[in-house]
Amino acid sequence: MQNLFQDLNPPACRLMGPGPVEVDPRVLNAMSMPMLGQFDPRFTSYMNEVMSLYRGIFQTRNEWTLLVDGTARAGIEAVMVSLLSPGDKVLVPVFGRFGHLLAEIAGRCRAEVITIEAEWGQVFDPQQIEDAIIQHRPKLLACVQGDTSTTMAQPLNEIGKICRAHDVLIAVDATASLTGMPLDTDDWQIDAVTAGLQKCLSGPPGIAPITLNDRAAELIQRRKHIEQGIRPDNYQAADGEMIQSNYFDLAMIMDYWSEARLNHHTEATSMLYAARECARIVLQEGWQTRFARHNQTSTALVNGLRAMDLEVFGKDLQYKMPNVTGVVIPKGVDADKLRGEMLHDFAIEIGTSFGPLHGKIWRIGTMGYGCRKDNVLACLAALEMTLRRNGHSAPAGAGVDAALAVYNDPSHDAFSNNITNA
């Protein structure tokens, strides 16, 4: 007889790694709403509302601000495969794992990929990027804003202007940073931005908000080919090369989200509901309050870790992301054993890292709904006790006391000056 297993009943857990994070209960409630037909006028009105809300999230007036069904990587792939033709030159500044991911995806689009690399824990000076653009003359610069693998954020406010001056498109992956730190798509002259829900937006992974400006949209429309069987009577293919993915073909996806309502796919209804509520929650909180909350929590966590005689990772902490913190693992401590004990004994999950930082740092996330005082205090208390059992002694209660001092004095906002221009 088929094993039906037990009822699904996962335990409650404080997700304090680099993502996914705890889903806001209001988002879970939105996901329980009834299904509607994808072309029901009530549902298409929700689609239009999502486009409007995410213009606010991305700080843009872009018409083409929509969702791609799939995790954050789906948004990246859709932008890459729709913008890049074989042989196009792409420049990727790599300062962590997710720069390598952008290079990987661009290579799979059969682009000519050029990378410049910074040591993990550092970011690029804008002049380094401009020098590489002048040297290589790429069609596209693909860049991560915040790379959770290193906990560092690349300042972007000058990069878009540099790209525009050299007639280079810029696509930014803001999955780990969107709504946790400023990203002003229009003022920073960014052509395409991609993200996911599972970080600061406090939703589940499974849908990818993106925005495209007119420069990017025009290039995509030059490659527009509609699949046979759903072509309108007046259809005429564009002259450009067909986009090499049907599912991620943004020309057709844009028609799906437009008044044309091209029947390209069946929208992930519950995920659209989630995305809609995620955006509502962020915009209702307001940018100043939201950024101040992430800054204060980051400062509290950093001060707490230092009070426990732990080193915060990063060559220059002015570039530290306010929503994820790297902790140098003390010598003699078994990193994975400690993470397992934190999860087993205290139901708190913190992250490890990748590549050259694997086994060298833990990563603690304070993102969106999870960016809360109770989470920080519980994490610091549990980390102190677990470290003590694993050979690293810290002054009893010092971490919690240091964090509470920040929460009791909001002037402790160590990273505010940095993130306003990041």
Image (cartoon, rainbow, N blue to C red):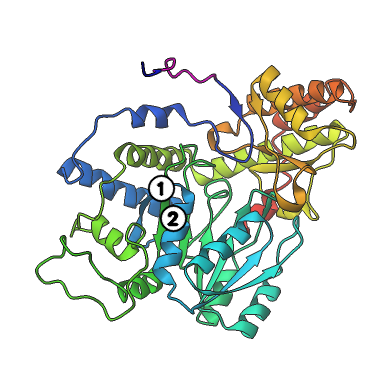
Q: Position of residue 173 (x, y in %)?
A: 53, 57
Q: Which residue is mark 2?
A: 75
Helix, strand or loop at mark 2: helix
Q: Quadrant of the C terminus?
A: bottom right
Relative depth, front residue between 72 and 277: 72
* Towards the viewer: 220 or 403: 220
Q: Quadrant of residue 66?
A: bottom left
Examine the rendered structure and indicate whether residue 417 appears above or below residue 2: below
For mark 1, what is the residue? 70
Query: Which SS class for mark 1?
Result: loop
Q: Position of residue 5 (x, y in %)?
A: 43, 17
Main secondary structure of the magenta stretch: loop
User: Along the horizontal axis of the image, is 10 left or right of 32?
Assistant: right
Q: Is residue 180 magenta?
A: no
For the view shown, which residue lies furthest in the front direction?
1
Q: Residues within 10 Å of mark 1 (few under 14, many from 20)?
A: some
Residue 5 on the magenta segment = yes
Q: Amino acid at mark 2?
A: Gly
Residue located 13% across and 65% down the image: 232
Query: Magenta span covers which residues?
Result: 4-11
- Considering every residue shown, the one lying at the far left of the view is 233
- Residue placed at 53% from the left, 68% from the top? 107
Tell me whether circle 1 and circle 2 mark residues in contact (CB < 8 Å): yes
Q: Earlier in the sequence, mark 1 or mark 2?
A: 1
Query: Dividing the image into 4 quarters, which one contains the N terminus?
Result: top left
Viewer-side residue, 256 vs 189 = 256
| Gap between marks 1 and 2 measured at Cα | 7 Å
Residue 331 appears in view = yes
